[in-house]
């Protein structure tokens, strides 16, 4: 761990310290940040306190007294529940405002990894427990130059694979008059395998009403058929097969006919305007050197769709953080499912993916946005989709 960097961040955020706590792997964020050796057996509670100034302090159970020995700092052991309380007092002595993996009112559940009882205990001994959400962003969501390059490469490749899939649909329709969603999904999986890309989620290939379900996926025994004059949504997620590589996540729309129905044209235009409005807000704020939070991006996109009369059909957040996991630990573009007041930081990546979902069809347009080290907003993988592709 880069203790000095963490302490600079604590001072910048006017926090007295960061208390990393875990019990049996419940706090995956603490597990990732502390990077304990594989041989460590974690069956008892441990605490690792990083003060804004001074030496870190550890609190471990006597049975597992060596669990935090790989980390710098002074060690205290506890045995009974009474000595646990005293130990927490001792390692946090002199600190009042302490960050933990906690979210007031569970506003951002993605960072709420510390149980309510532990927060109660800290408050009982007089500590002001606040969310570590923005600290987590800085140390979990910001990307190195190598990670940025891995994302840019993946974004270009999966965009090309989507175009390949549209060509495959066209070829199958010419030859057979129809093709199963499942067949195109596996065409995409083969493309990923051929180019050594990895994914955690099979591609979404959704026709007509299936595209109205944001989390639809075809399966071998439940896959609809794509035919002429159908609307097709493809959502592809993948990353390079290297340590710490970063995902790319893109959605495009196509129509298997020459004349796209007016309703599809209209709703795609609204969704793409929402996407572009959200992207412009992010770009302008960074260009002006002004802060922006995730909820503001969601509001900007949602307003466009709501003002066009389709607000009730936009049923998910505008975007999510992207990192080593497809849903990363940075700010989400969300003021619907959560009120995400985390600031968007340089060297982070996230999606902007507004959608309109009805009982008979769905429209989504998704781009990935990288905030470069130079504080510029970049749409990765190529220009955003301007209109529905005809195939």
Image (cartoon, rainbow, N blue to C red):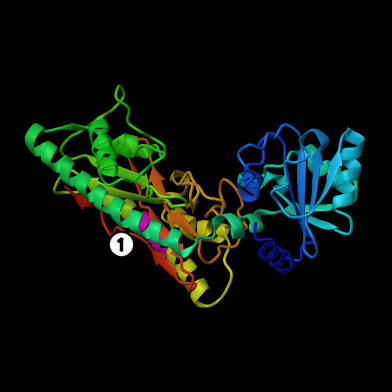
Q: Nearer the viewer, residue 269 or 275?
A: 275
Q: For label 1, count other residues whose C-alpha is less than 10 Å away and answer few (under 14), some (14-19) or many (20+).
A: some
263 up-or-down from 181: above or below: below
Q: Position of residue 40 (x, y in %)?
A: 66, 37
- What residue occupies the far top of the structure in this picture? 221
For the stretch drawn in magenta, the main secondary structure is: helix
Give the quarter of the figure containing the N terminus: bottom right
Instruction: Left or right? Give the position of 73 relative to 199.
Output: right
Please name the residue shown 46% across and 49% down the image.
Answer: 311
Q: Is residue 7 magenta?
A: no
Number of dots carrying numbers: 1
Q: Position of residue 209 (x, y in %)?
A: 32, 35
**Residue 193 visible here:** yes
Q: Quadrant of residue 45?
A: top right
Q: Is residue 275 magenta?
A: yes
**Residue 274 visible here:** no
Residue under label 1, please give it.
Answer: 382
Q: Position of residue 388 (x, y in %)?
A: 25, 52
76 up-or-down from 1: above or below: above
Residues shaded magenta = 269-277
Q: Quadrant of residue 292?
A: bottom right
Instruction: Left or right? Give the position of 94 relative to 363.
Output: right
Instruction: Left or right? Give the position of 91 relative to 185.
Output: right
Please name the residue shown 37% across and 61% down the image.
Answer: 380
Q: Position of residue 176 (x, y in %)?
A: 9, 32
SS at circle 1? loop
Q: Quadrant of residue 184?
A: top left
Q: Nearer the viewer, residue 53 or 18?
A: 53
């Amino acid at each position: 761990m880069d203790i000095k960097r963490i302490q600079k961040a604590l001072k910048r955020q006017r926090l007295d310290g960061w208390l990393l706590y875990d019990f049996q792997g419940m706090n995956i964020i603490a597990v990732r940040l502390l990077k304990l050796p594989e041989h460590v057996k974690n069956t008892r509670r441990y605490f690792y306190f990083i003060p804004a100034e001074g030496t870190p302090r550890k609190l471990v159970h006597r049975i597992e007294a060596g669990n935090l020995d790989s980390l710098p700092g002074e060690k205290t052991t506890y045995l009974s529940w009474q000595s646990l309380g005293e130990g927490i007092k001792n390692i946090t002595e002199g600190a009042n405002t302490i960050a933990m993996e906690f979210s007031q009112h569970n506003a951002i559940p993605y960072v709420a990894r510390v149980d309510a009882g532990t927060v109660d205990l800290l408050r009982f001994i007089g500590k002001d427990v606040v969310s570590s959400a923005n600290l987590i962003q800085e140390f979990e969501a910001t990307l190195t130059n190598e990670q940025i390059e891995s994302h840019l490469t993946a974004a270009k490749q999966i965009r090309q694979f989507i175009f390949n899939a549209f060509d495959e649909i066209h070829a199958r329709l010419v030859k057979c008059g129809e093709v199963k969603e499942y067949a195109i999904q596996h065409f995409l999986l083969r493309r990923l395998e051929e180019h050594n890309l990895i994914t955690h989620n099979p591609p979404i290939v959704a026709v007509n009403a299936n595209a109205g379900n944001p989390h639809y996926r075809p399966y071998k025994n439940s896959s609809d058929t794509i035919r002429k004059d159908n609307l097709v949504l493809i959502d592809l997620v993948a990353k390079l097969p290297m340590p710490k590589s970063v995902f790319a996540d893109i959605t495009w729309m196509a129509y298997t006919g020459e004349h796209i129905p007016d309703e599809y044209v209209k709703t795609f235009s609204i969704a793409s305007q929402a996407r572009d409005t959200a992207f412009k807000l992010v770009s302008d704020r960074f260009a002006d050197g002004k802060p922006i939070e995730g909820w503001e991006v969601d509001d900007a996109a949602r307003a466009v769709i709501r003002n066009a009369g389709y607000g009730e059909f936009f049923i998910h957040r505008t975007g999510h953080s992207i990192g080593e996991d497809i849903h990363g630990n940075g700010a989400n573009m969300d003021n619907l499912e959560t009120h995400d007041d985390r600031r968007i930081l340089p060297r982070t990546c996230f999606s902007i993916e507004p959608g309109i979902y009805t009982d008979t069809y769905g429209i989504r347009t998704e781009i990935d946005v990288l905030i470069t080290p130079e504080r510029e907003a970049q749409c990765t993988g190529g220009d955003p989709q301007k209109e529905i592709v005809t195939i």
